[in-house]
Image (tube, rainbow, N blue to C red):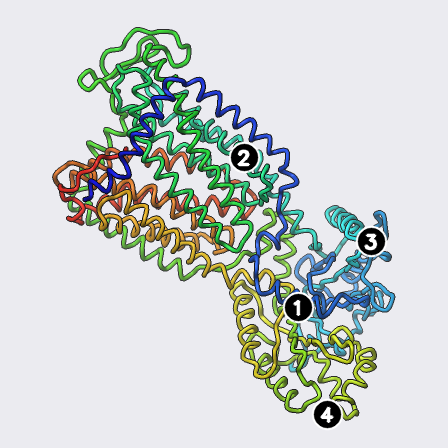
């Protein structure tokens, strides 16, 4: 049954590849030139690259259908932007520039000298002129530009600071927690004595995006060159800074492409090089890398033609494709070297395709399927990456069996003529396992095949027998136990979510600003909006108000809420008036006048004598880490759901980014589970022994746990960027473990140890070649100044390292313990 099962699938494919190999070998120039023409034609799609770029942070790095986006839609619908600006009531971050000002030596910032510097800096900022002035562009309240409380309270006079009495965090009904940071108070008092930092904002009216952008660019230019301050240090930021930095990041890795191709070509040539001047595979290895480059050019060009968005994360794909693309090349070269040298190139290529075709097809299927499953994620950046990468892998496969096959055939004709690899001049036939500059073309006269590569002999004669010794197996099991323990420990240390400051390059002013914000302004979190969206809610009813008060108390009792600061509630202020408001008619008749006089007009959607929605605000505290952000979001949403008789939602612009915490873990687990099941099905088809197929699934799980655990220990969080790589884990772990398991089952050796040695002999060197080439493809990203690219390198390094270690150490040893897999009744042809 096992043999029939394999033959029913494998034999037709093998025969089809054999015929294809014969055709490619017969007409190599056609299959050489045609792919080049296709790559050139499709590569023209790169003219659309600029217009296809999709680097909007919110669109690409937040969940597509995140709850906060729906909550924002409700807020925008019910509370449209007013002419009277209020930072507290913004439905988005707004358009702004900001400064965090600290003492040079960390001293008190509320001194006359420091405040003089602050006032001068403020004057310079407000004097920035582009096509318009700040006074014309600024957000206004009562016809005046929105000002900063710290400068207003001293009336822009530095000498006033010494006689200033400020209570903290509330002063005359105004919240100062986001304005002054790292404060010291008088003992047993809320009176402020000193502070380490001051933050000021410059908000712009959002009507004219172009002029605002020009002014913000002017602000950045001023601050990047501003050196007049004598006693203070300034960190600066604007609402367009993150976006600008993200877009600049992708440009920073372009110079690394040339280094990557050099490393890939060099490592490929070195791994395929022989001393024999005829049998060496220098040109074949070089063109294998060229084939991978053509695949990137063609696939990306095609998708750009089709209008597929090009996210920043896609910029890492060429590095991966280059590394993965040459893996199939090594398999084909390995199969070519096992053919008889005295046959025509056409026949050798047919045998190569017959031997390697099914294998590289399965490798491609597993990798492509892993990436297509990644399209299920709710992050557009991940979807874009997976689409471009999976398509590129398909083109890699196509070009390998056409373009690269043609290169093999032409190289075979050169070898058949015993011509030098560089000069193509015919050289004398070498005898024995040797060669040189003047002679070449040596082969084993007994088998009529090329001599084994030294590494193949090493795996067969030394490494395999060593690994199958009893004490070595025991040591391997102990090492694996340690690996698993460290991995599981790391999984429990994992942080969730993408910190937006990591979208900027290292050393960027954006990172400096966020660091100062975390250091000086993390005592208080966002002021969260509570929106009552029930049009039927009876605000005038004492019973309804009691339900609402109980609800507000639940929010106030949360550990993430500041119990010392009462909720900002228009209803409480309205009920504190001397009016009798327990009647609907009375309640509504006085409401408009109250709202206009009290400053709460933006908090109630009161139209056509109907309250459609209203909102209140709760101040949060101690939101210092990503875990705090996640816990706060969960706590507020859970509390909102538990409020009886009050239909409300919670919202803050930052929740758009916090939503990633709600989906990233569940979505990652879902993708991994689906992909693993799919890989299990493929391995069941590939390996005719169900128990051995389960070992492949075990290897997938083991590699994923290892990568997840060690990435946490390597300071990598679980976010939309690392999620991509965990999906990649599945494809790579299948590549290594499935083929080793298949080779073990397929081996005709009698004992389990001999089967393991045979499998390692056939696959050990190709696994090492593939691992080295893939790491060479991404290693330059370790030098990138961007978190996104460094994260990609770290996880790819872990994936390849652990995958290769499982393939050539753990799995062969574990398979020797599994007697069922070594039954001689299971005999099938090995595709390698």
Give the residue drawn at x 33%, y 10%.
Answer: 417
Q: Please state which of residues 312 and 524 is positioned toward the viewer in this rendering.
A: 312
In the picture of the structure, the residue carrying the numbered disc 4 is: 582
Q: Considering the image in quadrants, where does the N terminus appear?
A: top left
Give the residue drawn at x 57%, y 60%.
Answer: 65
Q: Helix, strand or loop at disc 2?
A: helix
Q: Are marks 1 and 3 in contact (CB under 8 Å)?
A: no
Disc number at residue 124?
A: 3
Q: Position of residue 381 (x, y in %)?
A: 55, 49
In this rendering, is residue 401 above or below 541? Answer: above
Q: Are marks 1 and 4 in contact (CB under 8 Å)?
A: no
Q: Position of residue 540 (x, y in %)?
A: 71, 88
Position of 24 compared to 536: left or right?
A: left
Disc number at residue 575?
A: none
In the picture of the structure, the residue carrying the numbered disc 2 is: 256
Q: Please state which of residues 90 and 563 is positioned toward the viewer in this rendering.
A: 90
Q: Quadrant of residue 274?
A: top left
Q: Quadrant of residue 460?
A: top left
Give the mark nearer the N terminus: 2 vs 3.
3
Crowding at dot 3, Cα within 10 Å, few <14 / some 14-19 / many 20+, comes out as some
Can residue 467 be seen in this snapshot?
no
Q: Considering the image in quadrants, where does the C terminus appear?
A: top left
Q: Please state which of residues 254 and 125 is positioned toward the viewer in this rendering.
A: 254
How far apart marks 2 and 4 lie (CA) works out to: 71 Å
In the picture of the structure, the residue carrying the numbered disc 1 is: 74
How far apart marks 2 and 3 lie (CA) works out to: 40 Å
Give the mark nearer the N terminus: 1 vs 2.
1
Position of 755 compared to 72: left or right?
A: left
Q: Quadrant of residue 421?
A: top left
């Amino acid at each position: 049954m096992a043999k029939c099962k394999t033959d029913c699938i494998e034999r037709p494919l093998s025969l089809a590849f054999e015929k294809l190999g014969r055709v490619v070998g017969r007409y190599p120039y056609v299959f050489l030139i045609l792919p080049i023409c296709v790559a050139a034609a499709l590569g023209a799609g790169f003219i659309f690259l600029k217009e296809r770029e999709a680097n909007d942070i919110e669109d690409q790095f937040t969940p597509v259908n995140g709850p906060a986006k729906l909550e924002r839609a409700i807020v925008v619908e019910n509370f449209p932007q007013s002419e009277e600006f209020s930072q507290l009531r913004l439905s988005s971050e707004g358009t702004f520039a900001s400064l965090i000002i600290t003492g040079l030596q960390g001293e008190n910032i509320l001194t006359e000298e420091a405040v003089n510097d602050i006032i001068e800096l403020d004057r310079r900022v407000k004097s920035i002129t582009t096509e318009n002035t700040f006074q014309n562009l600024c957000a206004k309240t009562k016809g005046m530009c929105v000002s900063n409380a710290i400068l207003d309270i001293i009336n822009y006079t530095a000498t006033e600071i010494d006689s200033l009495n400020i209570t903290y965090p509330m002063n005359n009904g105004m919240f100062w927690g986001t304005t002054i940071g790292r404060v010291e108070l008088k003992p047993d008092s809320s009176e402020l004595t000193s502070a380490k930092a001051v933050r000021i904002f410059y908000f712009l009216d959002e009507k004219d995006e172009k002029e605002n952008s020009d002014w913000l660019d002017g602000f950045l230019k001023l601050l990047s060159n501003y050196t007049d301050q004598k006693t203070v240090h300034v960190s600066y930021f604007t609402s367009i800074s993150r976006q600008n930095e993200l877009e600049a990041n992708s440009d920073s890795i372009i110079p690394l492409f040339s280094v990557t191709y050099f490393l890939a070509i060099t490592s490929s040539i070195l791994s395929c090089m022989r001393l024999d001047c005829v049998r060496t595979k220098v040109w074949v290895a070089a063109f294998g890398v060229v084939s991978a480059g053509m695949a990137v050019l063609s696939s990306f060009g095609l998708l750009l033609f089709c209008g597929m968005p090009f996210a920043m994360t896609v910029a890492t794909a060429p590095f991966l494709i280059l590394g993965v693309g040459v893996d199939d090349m090594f398999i084909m070269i390995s199969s070519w070297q096992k053919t008889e040298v005295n046959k025509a190139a056409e026949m050798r290529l047919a045998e190569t395709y017959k031997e390697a075709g099914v294998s590289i097809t399965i490798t491609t299927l597993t990798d492509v399927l892993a990436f297509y499953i990644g399209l299920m994620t709710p992050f557009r950046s991940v979807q874009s990456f997976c689409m471009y990468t999976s398509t590129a892998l398909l083109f890699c496969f196509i070009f390998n069996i056409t373009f690269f096959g043609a290169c093999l055939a032409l190289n075979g004709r050169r070898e058949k003529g015993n011509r030098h690899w560089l000069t193509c001049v015919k050289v004398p036939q070498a005898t024995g396992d040797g060669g040189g500059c003047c002679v070449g073309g040596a082969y084993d006269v007994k088998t009529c095949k090329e001599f084994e590569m030294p590494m193949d002999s090493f795996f067969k004669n030394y490494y395999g027998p060593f690994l199958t010794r009893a004490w070595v197996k025991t040591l391997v099991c102990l090492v694996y136990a340690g690996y698993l323990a460290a991995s599981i420990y790391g999984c429990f240390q994992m942080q969730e979510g993408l910190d937006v400051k990591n979208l900027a390059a290292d050393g960027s002013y954006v990172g400096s600003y966020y660091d100062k914000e975390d250091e000086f302004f993390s005592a208080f979190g966002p002021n969260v909006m509570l929106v009552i969206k029930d049009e039927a809610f009876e605000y005038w009813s004492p019973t309804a108000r009691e339900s609402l008060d109980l609800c507000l108390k639940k929010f106030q009792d949360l550990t993430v809420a500041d119990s010392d600061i009462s909720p900002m509630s228009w209803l409480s202020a309205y009920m504190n008036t001397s009016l009798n408001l327990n009647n609907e008619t009375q309640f509504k008749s006085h409401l408009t006048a109250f709202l206009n006089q009290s400053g709460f007009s933006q908090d109630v959607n009161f139209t056509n004598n109907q309250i459609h929605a209203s909102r209140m605000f709760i101040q949060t505290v101690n939101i210092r880490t990503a875990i705090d952000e996640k816990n706060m979001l969960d706590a507020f949403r859970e509390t909102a759901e538990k409020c009886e008789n009050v239909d409300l939602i919670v919202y803050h612009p930052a929740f758009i980014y916090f939503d990633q915490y709600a989906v990233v873990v569940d979505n990652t687990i879902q993708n991994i589970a689906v992909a693993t099941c799919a890989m299990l099905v493929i391995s069941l088809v590939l390996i005719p022994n169900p128990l051995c197929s389960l070992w492949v699934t075990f290897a997938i799980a083991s590699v994923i746990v290892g990568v997840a655990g060690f990435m946490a220990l390597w300071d990598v969080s679980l976010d939309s960027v690392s999620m991509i790589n965990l999906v990649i884990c599945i494809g790579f772990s299948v590549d290594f473990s499935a083929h080793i398991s298949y080779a073990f089952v397929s081996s005709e050796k009698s004992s389990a140890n001999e089967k393991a040695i045979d499998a390692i002999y056939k696959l050990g060197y190709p696994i090492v070649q593939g691992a080295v080439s893939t790491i060479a493809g991404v290693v330059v990203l370790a030098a990138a100044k961007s978190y996104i690219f460094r994260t990609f390198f770290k996880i790819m390094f872990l994936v390849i390292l652990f995958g290769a270690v499982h393939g050539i150490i753990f799995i062969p040893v574990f398979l020797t313990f599994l007697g069922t897999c070594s039954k001689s009744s299971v005999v099938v042809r090995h595709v390698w």
